[in-house]
Image (spheres, grey):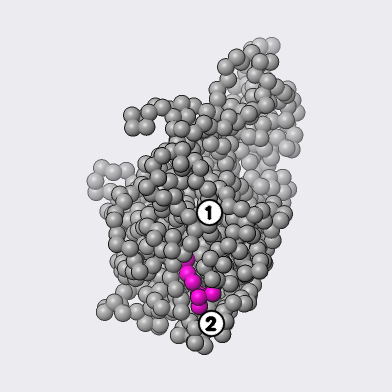
Amino acid sequence: MDDKLETIQNICQKIVDTTNLYSFSKLDDQQVYSLMRLREISHRVISDRDSRVTKNDVISAMCSYINKLAGKCKDIVDLVNRMSNKDLDDQQLQQLSRLKELLCGIVDGAKDVETEPSHIVEQGIASDMWITESLEVEPIDSSNDDVLLGETQLIMVEDEQAVAEARLENKYYDLSHVKHSVTWPPNGSLTLEWVLELMKTFGESSRNYLPMEFQFVMPVSVVDAILDVGASILHKEPNCVEIDCHGEVSNVVIVGDIHGHYHDLLHLFELANLPSKTQYYVFNGNYVNRGAWGLEVFLVLLVWKILMPDRVYLLRGNHETRICTSSFGFEKEVGTKYGEQGEKVYHRCLETFKELPLAAIIAGKVYTTHGGLFRKPCNPDVQNGKERETHELRIGSLQDLSKLERFFIDIPTQDEDPNIILADVLWSDPSKIDGLRKNQVRGAGLLWGPDSTEAFLKLSNLKLIIRSHEGPDSRDGKIDFDDMIMGYSTDHDRESGKLYTLFSAPDFPQFGRKSYNNEGAYATLKPPDFETPSFHTFKAADKPKINVCYFGCEGHDVDLDLTLMALADVVSSKNSSPVEIHSGVDFEALGIVNPPSWSITLTDDATGTQNVQIPKAPVVEGLPLPPNIEEPHKAAYEYFLELIAGLKFMLQKTENTNNMHIPHRKRKKLN
């Protein structure tokens, strides 16, 4: 019997090997299903399992097959991104673009299978999920010893086996379809016609070309010129710009978070009209991340600033920082669009971001900013730790804001830093509870109550605050606040004035499994008093289809915005004592006498010994656990998985901190 079983198992192994090498491109959906079922039955025989193969087993196997294929495709995309392009001609660049487009299409298709596997099987599996046909391509010649693509094989994976062969076709790379390449005006003087043509060109590029072809539409030299001129203008502006529109028949349009929604920005301009001598614009930041066209948004707004510096005002948002752009898609977006030159363009953008002013006063009545209010900074002469501990948080003044050194790529993280209010301005949120306290949810900035709004308005002789920073995702679950589905909300209404939140990215986010189907909004202030805003809502504009893998956004449902920034406060001062995270795990029942702690002690040559609290990570790999795990083992597994995730999170913070700090350059204060 054993000999017979071994023979049967050998036959089944051959069946598995054969199906692994089989091309699915010429099979219909039912044949694919039957082949996968046969392979699963053979697997059961090989592993000596006698259970029946169900429909769900086949679906699971097919999903696993697709996911492994998608994983290998993503690996190849990463490999292509790391390749040097400097020695490639136009034909070879086109081959790379076609390869990446094919791979990203497979990855996107796999996401659909992951969300509704049974639906995919019952409705029929699209043949292009499995690679529709064999594509022929000439090998890319390499004059040096570097291995480029040659006869590239795509991988359909069963364990480590590479099975499905595909070659790219079309040796000729025709750039004639790129009809217009932007050129910088010879005299460097922008005109309205040039700006409008740029907006049109970016729109056409987004619909007609691949993201990696953007570099042919918008050369790096033109990007450099825009960033150079724009940064020089922004640098001369004070931290809080004053927009004096008294006595003018002019409107002021205020725009909230845009997050790479380029087509919605164009739609907003259609609705509200373009900047002009009789129409000011104030943008509250968050131009990039979580959208596919953040670079286009920022460049277009910057050229408007260059064209009309006293009518268009660009403020900084919390996403105009290195830590956010490296985590939420903008760095990957720029790298995709500019390839080998992407790192240079990305760092040029970071240098420009830090020049952005932080707030605006409109007509002496309205304060607008990205995050919100800020504390009065500690006295820089206070060195005693005990005195620091007793320092109460108090609302800062416009004078405090004017003294801030704003030119940092990332925000300061220490409470005693006199520039800590940079974090407050970018990261703070309103609360329904009176008082001023640290924003523990964000990990940076403050929470301020209605009494603080009242105090700031009185102190500054203002009537209104319009801020941004919170969209429908941030308001999800905040039952005491408006949900931002209409793009704006009234958060505080006191005797001295009101506080509004404004969000201008409809159908947010572009990336992610959950879209809020929200509307965007903008606010208009009109003479003579500019104190009563009118809010205008708008639906999302039609957008081209995007491949998420170009932009590095996996679209977590959890808002990681500043769970990332909670990293900034991971290491407490050496005099503070960490708060132990209680696990609720019965370690004694498991025989564990000394379980690992969330509080650890580190020794540093400069600061001596200090206690460090390991942070909670926003995402924990391995959770949720399977339902068949019982207590106390379940709680212990969760504890250890969360602790490991926290340690990884902490190490990431340390690496980010080491990378983010730039030399502090003394600059003369701007008036």
Looking at the rendering, the stretch of residues picked out in magenta corresponds to: 359-366
Give the residue at mark 1. Answer: 394
Give the residue at mark 2. Answer: 251
Tell me where residue 172 appears, x and y as whole percent.
Answer: 36, 61
Tell me where residue 371 appears, x and y as whole percent.
Answer: 53, 59
Foreground residue among 517 and 403:
403
Foreground residue among 94 and 669:
669
406 relative to 494 in the view: left or right: left
Element at label 1: loop
The amino acid on which the numbered mark 1 sits, given as a three-letter code, is Arg
438 relative to 241 in the view: left or right: right
Foreground residue among 22 and 520:
520
Distance from the alpha carbon under mark 2 to that under mark 1 = 34 Å
Q: Is residue 482 magenta?
A: no
Element at label 2: strand
Q: Is residue 93 above or below residue 176?
A: above
